Image: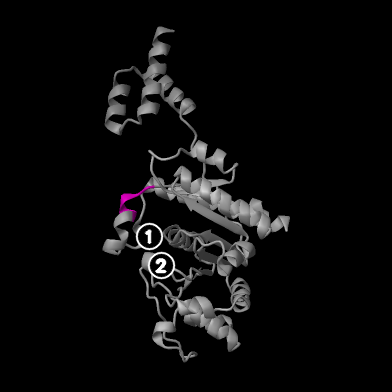
Amino acid sequence: MHHHAKIQRLGEIINQEKLNKKKRAYLFGLLNESHQKLLEEYIQKKRPKKVQEVVYDSPIQNKIITIFDEPQFTAELAVQLSRKYPNHRIALLDTDRLMPSLEVYLNVNTYVKSVYSQLSLSQSTGINLLIDGHYKQLLSRKYLDHVAIKSHKIRNLFFFSGSYRLDDYEYFRLDAFNEVIKVLRLHYDLVILNTNAFIYDAFTCVGLMESDLNIIPLKGRLPELKCMKRQMDFLSVKQDLTEHKTWYVLFNHQKNQMNNKLFKEMVQGYYLGNISYNKIRDSALIHHYPLTKIGNSNTKKQWEKLIYKMMKEVNRNESCK
């Protein structure tokens, strides 16, 4: 029994410490052949079984996800989804009419020279060309793909940039925007909308209302969270915004901020996950790092978990309609 206890202890050390081959061989060399056999049996018996990661790979078809006022999160999410679903067509539209900035995070162009449009280059942003195409009845799949900005590294992501012209805020009509959203849903497997933080902006309201899932990324600061909850509660009453399709994410979250458990309680369980702070993310804009390079193995796992739960909720909301 004394020898068995020692062998058990050695087995625990090997399993817990994950010793390299050299150290493992040294420990085995201290034992005779029969004890070596017992040790190997114990290690195999007690070694934690590798849990195979479950990937929610249900087909995406004509879904809309709206991100509320966090372009950096939106850009990273679009890149992650495009890499995870390479055979799906993913559209990304910047609907922020006050401060569009997705092209900065994606490190792509803002303007598109279109053979279909007479607009000046300063007006040739994605959303301008979409609305212009609506009035000209040009919104076919061919036209959409033509005016979309594409990255040579991510061929299945079609980006439509926002307008920097404040005049457009007044002249963009809501009915035209509604039609654009419908056409995008028809021609792409997944549409991602980025909105501004102004809940009285008609485009923001439409984006939140027409989506299959709304995501509110926050850094975990209490005043910010309280303010956002009040706004979403207001919209659920005034605009009949469906509460169960609005979910929260801790994004660029640091350990000294609100912990996951408290955050989950405050959003009443509507918590998708956490994407931790990453110092590379801060310098990405300065050094023009591609978003595919942001993140270590832990960040990648966090994105995997978040996307799994996100797509699960998207499909669940679809079945509830």
Count of numbered badges drawn on the protein: 2
**Residue 27, horizontal then vertical, whole percent:** 30, 22
Left or right of 70 on screen, residue 296:
left
Task: Quickly name the residue at label 1.
Answer: 292
Task: Quickly name the residue at label 2.
Answer: 101
- Mark 1 and mark 2 lie on one chain; the one further toward the N terminus is 2
Q: Residue at x 60, y 75 (%)?
A: 174
Evaluate whether residue 273 shows in this view.
no
Q: Which residues are magenta?
A: 277-281
Q: Type of residue at label 1?
A: Thr
Q: Residue at x 63, y 65 (%)?
A: 210
Left or right of 32 on screen, residue 183:
right
**Residue 179, horizontal then vertical, whole percent:** 63, 77
Q: Is residue 279 magenta?
A: yes
196 in relation to 266, above or below: below
**Residue 191, horizontal then vertical, whole percent:** 56, 67
Which residue is nearer to you in this view: 303 or 15? 303
- Local SS, label 1: helix
Q: Residues within 10 Å of mark 1 (few under 14, many from 20)?
A: few
* Colour scheme of the rendered structure: one colour
Q: Residues within 10 Å of mark 2 (few under 14, many from 20)?
A: many
On-image quarter of the N terminus = top left
**Residue 139, horizontal then vertical, whole percent:** 58, 83
Q: Between label 1 and label 2, give the one nearer the viewer.
A: 2
Residue sitting farthest toward the right: 321
Most common SS among magenta residues: helix
Q: Type of residue at label 2?
A: Ser
Evaluate whether residue 219 shows in this view.
yes
150 in relation to 41, above or below: below
Left or right of 204 on screen, residue 280:
left
